[in-house]
Amino acid sequence: MGLAHVLDSNKTIRSIGFDDASFERGTDEPIGLAGVVCEATRFDGMVWGTVNPDGWDANATMVELLEGSKFLPQLHVALVDGVAFGGFNVLDLEQLAERLELPVVAVMRNEPDFERIEAALQHVSDPDRRLERMHRAGTIYEGRHLHFQVQGTSPELARQMLDRLRHTGHIPEPLRIAHLVASAVGTGESGRRA
């Protein structure tokens, strides 16, 4: 059942939100990645993996965590906290939507500052390729108290879905919980801000 049908018929949205654990710059250690599954805004399950700092495996890790899992057939949408994990391990958002056969929405509190991002990218390999992936993720849209990029559905449907997945605060609940879990595993306690 597609996202449009779920929204039109006011059915419960099943989603997953991915966020990475905090980490120290310059580390070579894999970085934790929490994937939190929610039925509407209620926690319903979780997957856990790792990504390499400034690597190229964020897409593969998310696909591996979901393909063959009990969760993937139930999901209507995947949410990601921005398009970069573990520093500059940049997602190919379009490819992720195609592989999972789901809409994928990258959520950001603020519009990215591409001047600062370009400067920071000069410290990692293949900066142009990483920046190109960021731009290829699509137009940055404004939502209620956040910004987002979307592949696999329309910005209008993505906006409606994001509004329905809020419980407390401005961040959709799957991403808020993923942030809390990832930060607790990474630092020993959950962070204050999702």
Image: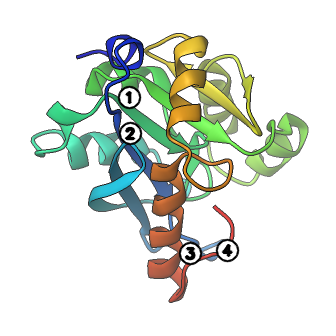
Q: Is residue 3 above or below residue 76?
A: above
| Type of amino acid at the residue the image marks with label 4 | Arg
CA separation in Å, label 1 and label 2: 6 Å
Q: Nearer the viewer, residue 18 or 60?
A: 18
Tag 4 residue? 192
Mark 4 or mark 3, whichever is nearer to me: 4
Tag 2 residue? 59
Rendered location of residue 47, percent (x, y): 27, 58
Q: Is residue 5 visible?
A: yes
Mark 1 or mark 4, whichever is nearer to me: 4
Res. 63 image quadrant:
top left
Residue sitting at x 65%, y 25%: 132
| Type of amino acid at the residue the image marks with label 1 | Leu
| Of the image marks 3 and 2, the number of the one nearer the N terminus | 3
In the picture, the disc for residue 96 is: 1
Query: Mark 4–mark 3 contact, CB under 8 Å?
Result: no
| Type of amino acid at the residue the image marks with label 2 | Asn
Residue sitting at x 50%, y 56%: 19
CA separation in Å, label 1 and label 4: 29 Å
| Type of amino acid at the residue the image marks with label 3 | Thr
The secondary structure type at the circle numbered 4 is loop
CA separation in Å, label 2 and label 4: 27 Å
| Of the image marks 3 and 1, the number of the one nearer the N terminus | 3
Residue sitting at x 61%, y 39%: 107
Mark 3 or mark 1, whichever is nearer to me: 1
